[in-house]
Image: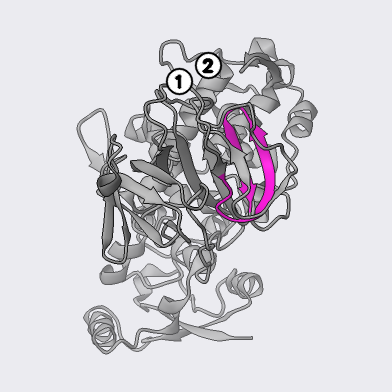
Amino acid sequence: MPSIKIIVNPRTEYYPEGWSFGNNPVYQEIVDYTGVKLTTHWEEGAGVVTAQKLAADLAAGTLPDMFATGGLFLEQLIESDAIADFKAIWDATASPLTVQKKRYPDYKWWKQTLRGDKLYGIPFVYGPAYVDFDTEAFVQKQGGYLAEYSEWLGGELLSGAEVVDLVAHHYSVGPRLLLAIMELRSNWVTGSAGQVSSLPLGYNGGGWDLLSRQLAWAADELNRGYYDWRGRGIAPLSWPDGTVSHYPPDLNAATAGLYYFFSLDSDRPGWEVLVGDGPGSFREAYRQLFGDPARYAVEPLIPADTAIPELVLPWARGEDWFYTGGPHGAWSEGSAWAAVDFVPDEGFLGCQAATSWARAAAGGLVVYSGTGEVSLDLDGDGYEQTGWVLFYLHLATDGRVTEGTYLKQGDPVGHPSCEGGFAESTHLHFARKYNGEWIAADGPLPLVLSGWQFFSDGKEYDGTAVRGGEERVAAEARDHSLNGLRTDR
């Protein structure tokens, strides 16, 4: 069994009488769960001595192995207060629970915060955790108002579960997450018609009372918190009394997204209940529907060695198109700035479908083909929730490739138009996902098409494309030297 050192500050007033690291009631539980034996470091020093040792190791680059251990394991140890509680590390990593307690938690409290009840175990994006999840079957089994609900959407009568799945697909937010919030806010999942709130997600915006609108609002705001934390930059939480709260630095994006979402219509005491662990909390609602969220966790969602696929500009070799929209939301404003826009060189089209074809930027399997959109699964396993997926939006019905078709790089996908989503003129909206997460065009896994790398200028739709010494600028123009791109490789 591997062994790592963790920092322990042995000031006895912080621990129960007779405590030692090895005889703590849940020490063996941690060892069994993580498969890692924990040993101590700097035990002989306390207070200022410990801080001095930390400073020396920081300067020398010789921090204990604990600080090189990432992922869920590190988050669990931070949350359970198993790492140092001295100020230099405390302020940087402590959870709200730890900050409030300011002492080693007793056995019952520690056990409750170890893993199963934590926000970060909850699959947030519509990723691998949802490959085998049947929303319709789950909703019908619960027998609540949602099981009876139906809504006309896009010319089709959809069941409540189908509406949930459609929103999950578009925003790439997990159905379990949406259902748990719905249950918390309105009791729609398990409650009968006379027991539910009229607003399934609790949003009071005018004209947004339909389930599809409520879910769209919730999914977009959840995404806003998630992807702002991912790198766009996130503002402190603001409360009605004029105070603010800063996010703890040890959060992951899923927790940040939920913290942000529940802050939107709450004061701070109400928010603390919602993100807590007791009655009326999101965690309680989730556990009552789905049990321990850790059973669904996929960590890491994006492994450190993930490679970007080799992609070409999504039109025919030798054709000129124009780069009209820099990095912006893949689906609505809250999602990652994963999408870029292009228009073919056919003059002003208005909303008339183009004659040019949008084509496959790489080979793959079409796993979704619906109003205006196509999802192309590059690993060919048949799931949009796993691996790399290319997303095409605003494709005309006439000529759009059908679901289940295998495409080679360069094969036709569809004709750009105004169909699907929101569009004021004909164009192609192009984005990528990996394991269900929208991948920012200008990020650690950059968008590169035929050697052109796409950059954001810090504002939606503003950006550049660079290849070697050439640069193109996203613009509502048709100027070959300014924003023209040709597929030549």
Residue 199: which disc? Answer: 2
Q: Are marks 2 and 1 in contact (CB under 8 Å)?
A: yes
Which element is circle 2 on?
loop
Q: Is residue 172 visible?
A: no
Residue 231 percent coordinates (x, y): 34, 53
Q: Is residue 452 magenta?
A: no
Q: Is residue 363 magenta?
A: yes
Amino acid type assigned to the residue bearing label 1 in the image: Tyr
Q: Quadrant of the N terminus?
A: bottom right
Tell me how the rendering is colored: one colour
**Residue positioned 73% across, 44% down in the render:** 405
> Magenta segment range?
359-377
**Residue positioned 67% across, 58% down in the render:** 379
What secondary structure is the magenta-colored segment mainly?
A: strand
Q: Is residue 238 visible?
A: yes
Residue 50 percent coordinates (x, y): 28, 82
The crowd level at tag 2 (other Cα within 10 Å; few <14, some 14-19, many 20+) is some
**Residue positioned 52% across, 67% down in the render:** 307
Q: Which of the 4 image quadrants contains residue 179?
A: top right
The crowd level at tag 1 (other Cα within 10 Å; few <14, some 14-19, many 20+) is some
In the rendered structure, the answer to whether residue 270 lies left or right of residue 187 reads: left
Against 412, is 202 above or below?
Answer: above
In the rendered structure, the answer to whether residue 276 lies left or right of residue 11 reads: right
**Residue positioned 31% across, 70% down in the render:** 89
Most foreground residue, 116 or 171: 171
| Numbered circles on residues, count | 2
Amino acid type assigned to the residue bearing label 2 in the image: Leu
Q: Which of the 4 image quadrants contains residue 153?
A: top right
Residue at the disc numbered 1 = 203
Which residue is at the far front? Answer: 318
Residue 413: which disc? Answer: none
In the rendered structure, the answer to whether residue 360 lies left or right of residue 140 reads: left
